Image (tube, rainbow, N blue to C red):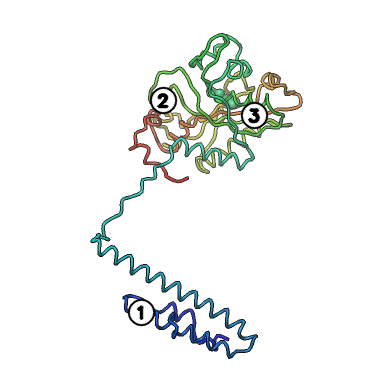
Amino acid sequence: MEQKIKLTEDQVNSFRIKTKEDLEQYRLQFISKKGVIATLFEELKSLSAEEKKLAGKMLNDLKKLSEEKFFLAQEAFESTKLSASEDIDLTLPVTPNKTGSYHPLNLTRYRIIEIFERLGFNVEDGPEIEDDWHNFTALNFPESHPAREMQDTFFIEKNPDILLRTHTSNVQIRLMKDRKPPFRAIMPGRVYRNEAISARAHCFFHQVEGLYVDKNVGFSDLKQTLYHFTKEMFGKDTKIRLRPSYFPFTEPSAEIDISCLICHGQGCNVCKYSGWVEIAGSGMVHPEVLRHCNIDPEEYTGFAFGMGIERITMLRHRINDLRLFSENDIRFLKQFKATY
Ligand code: DAH
């Protein structure tokens, strides 16, 4: 059939249009009323119905291809003509398009979410202005317990107390009170503490809370989940260590350390020469906390964890001063990725 057409895509494609004269030659040869394509359409009439169908399609495709090439080339010549007449220097570099970049804390937050979403965790949200019950009492901080002292914050109202939440653990309570188990969620957000601002502390920072409550959830689930997380987040050679600790809302409780990414366990000022850096608090949800949320601890168990987004970002990007995150210095911010 192609022999009957006597024209191929290659012939159209290989015609070089470098000058306006070439363009005119091309037009005459392919597009004009006396050009090859028009002539071939004439010849089509002499073919059998069967042949006409196939050859017609091929010819139409060729017509489209050759016309597209013509219009593109024509347009290119027209736009250069315009530039030349306006005396524009086409070799000048273009003004870059300033797109901005993601805040490093957001980059870390997105990455954490990505890792946990693949493990089946939902993302949940809760209020930053919270009452005493959700921030402390339901989490098993007895009134006047010293643990409350460690989380002094800013009070909006006293008696009953309305405050800026000291951690994202309040979202655990809101989730468990409002819905029925099982729960598998992470809860990122901003938290507040009444602390003097320094390179290592700030009056606000960010955490990601995690909660997994179901039948038969054990400490091994906690360990494996966080083990998987650290490998994904910091690389497969990262080691993890669980250190016994105390939180009123978990029993047993553990602090999660990872091997120092800066000195790889050799000892440096980031890990205070211990080779380990703490990244999260964790533990098995205290039965009393479940009871406060009307969940039967005989039927359900769960683990929880809370990690600092600033701390993880500082480790990831070797940042040594917490204040950089909130100073909005463009020289700092523009070092991070513009796309995620
Ligand atoms: N809320 C704790 C804090 O801000 C962190 C934490 C520790 C959260 C253990 C948890 C947990 O969910 O299980 O210091």
Q: Residue at x 48, y 74 (%)?
A: 65
In this view, the residue in front, 42 or 265, is 42
x and y percentages locating residue 2 in the rendered image? 55, 85
According to the picture, the residue beneath numbered tag 3 turns out to be 303
In this view, the residue in front, 213 or 293, is 293
In this view, the residue in front, 308 or 65, is 65
Q: Residue at x 62, y 86 (%)?
A: 51
State which tag comes first along the sequence, 2 or 1: 1
| Residue 147 visible, this angle | no
According to the picture, the residue beneath numbered tag 2 turns out to be 200
**Relative vertical location of residue 21 with respect to residue 339 in this rendering, above or below:** below
| Residue 96 visible, this angle | yes
Outermost residue toward the right in this view: 299
Residue 24's disc number: 1
SS at badge 2 = loop
x and y percentages locating residue 80 in the rendered image? 30, 66
Q: CA distance from mark 2 to mark 1?
A: 72 Å
SS at badge 3 = strand
**Relative vertical location of residue 209 with respect to residue 75 in this rendering, above or below:** above
Mark 3: which amino acid? Phe
Q: Is mark 3 within 8 Å of ligand 1?
A: yes
In this view, the residue in front, 28 or 98, is 28
Outermost residue toward the front in this view: 33
State which tag comes first along the sequence, 3 or 1: 1
Say whether marks 3 and 1 touch (CB < 8 Å).
Answer: no
Q: Residue at x 42, y 27 (%)?
A: 272
Q: Is mark 1 within 8 Å of ligand 1?
A: no
Q: Nearer the viewer, mark 3 or mark 1?
A: 1
